[in-house]
Image (cartoon, helix red, strand yellow):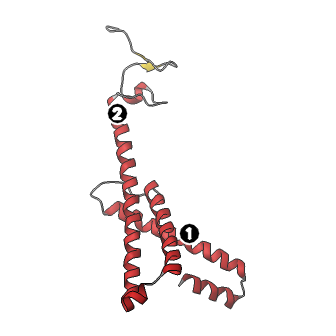
Amino acid sequence: VGPYLGHWAADYFGLGSQFDLAWGIGRWVGAGLLVMLVWAICYKFLPNTDAPFRIFTPGAAIGVLLWLGLSALFGLYLSHFNSYEATYGALGGAIIFLLWLWLSGIALLFGAEVNEVLDDMHRAERARIESGDVASPGLLAADRGLPGRRDGSGRDQRPAAGH
C-alpha cells in the first residue's frame, strides 16, 4: 500500500517527485523503526530472562537491517521471477506471505542470537573482572575489591604482609 499511497499523496497535493523519493525512503525507515520497537518488546518478554527493556540493541539493529534486506531482495525476486500464482492459483498469495513471514522470523531469531551472544560475553567478562582473574584497562584495584592500588606499570602495589 505504501507506494500507492505515496503516489496518490504526491499527485493529490502536487508535491512532486521529491516527495516520492522521500516517501520511498521514509517508509523503509519507518518500517525499520516500527519493527525494532516490536522486536524489542519480543526480546524483553519472550525469553525467560530478566534483561532490561532496551529498544536499540545490537541484535535488534542487525536483525532489522537483515529483515529490511531480506524483504527488499524478496520483493525483487517476486517482481522478476514470480510464478507462484500461475503454479498455485489463489493460494499463491498465501504462500508468498508465509514465505515472507518465515524470512522475517529468521531475521528476528538471528538478532536475538546476536543479543544473547553479546550478553554472554559481557557476563563472562564481568565475572572475570569481579573474580580478579583479568585486569580491565582503566579499572582500579579498589574498584575490583582488591587491596592495594595500581601504578602505571600495570602491577598491583600491595602492602607488605604485617603492615
- Side of 13 relative to 71 (left or right): right
- Say which element carries label 2: helix
- Callout 2: few (<14), some (14-19), or many (20+) C-alpha neighbours within 10 Å? some
Mark 1, residue position: 29
**Camera-nearest residue between 155 and 11:** 11
Q: Residue at x 44, y 60 (%)?
A: 60
Q: Residue type at mark 2?
A: Arg
Residue 117, horizontal then vertical, whole percent: 37, 49
Q: Can you see residue 55? A: no
Q: Residue at x 40, y 80 (%)?
A: 97
- Callout 1: few (<14), some (14-19), or many (20+) C-alpha neighbours within 10 Å? few
Q: Which mark is residue 161?
A: none
Which residue is at the far left? Answer: 48
* Depicted 104 relative to depicted 115: above or below: below
Mark 2, residue position: 128
Image quadrant where residue 10 sits: bottom right
